[in-house]
Amino acid sequence: MRGCGGAGVAARAASALALASLHAPNAAEVRSEGGVAVLATALGAGVSEAAAALVNVSKGDAAARDALLAAGGAALLVREVSAGAPAAQAEAAGAIATLAADSARLAEAVVAAGAVL
């Protein structure tokens, strides 16, 4: 996350966003502030906790899923499943399962990135 000052701080920030965004108004606020792109960037930088936050922020919101696709989120999640640590693999697999079930476009992007659904 922007200027978080290290991987540990970024991981804690992503975890906090994941928890906060369980409450729909908080998820909407994260979306409105460009949080999907920021979380995708964090995931790309190896912050596996961002996967859970991406699910909570993007679930049920087509615009958020579009932002996730635009940020390359499908490929990032597939990469985590393929090469991440076991906990990161589980988070990313859960994110893919949840988001792909909600969006044919995201499911297609995940398959195009090399995953088998």
Image (tube, helix red, strand yellow):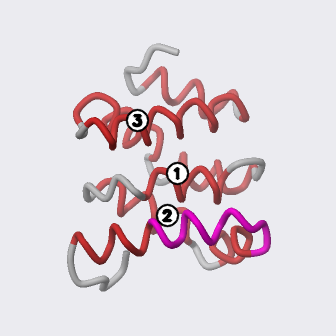
Which residue type carries mark 2?
Answer: Ala
Label 3 neighbour load within 10 Å: few <14, some 14-19, many 20+: some
Q: CA distance from mark 2 to mark 3?
A: 21 Å
What kind of element bears circle 3? Answer: helix
As displayed, is residue 92 above or below residue 27?
above
Query: Which residue is disc 2 drawn over?
Result: 37
Q: Residue at x 55, y 70 (%)?
A: 35
Whether 52 is among the magenta residues is no
Apparent side of residue 65 relative to residue 79 in the rendered image (left or right): right
Label 2 neighbour load within 10 Å: few <14, some 14-19, many 20+: many
| Magenta segment boundaries in residue numbering | 15-25
Earlier-in-chain disc, 2 versus 3: 2
Q: Residue at x 74, y 70 (%)?
A: 28
As displayed, is residue 60 above or below residue 115?
below
Task: Name the spot of residue 69 as percent of width and height, x first.
Answer: 54, 46
Earlier-in-chain disc, 1 versus 3: 1
Apparent side of residue 85 relative to residue 68 in the rendered image (left or right): left
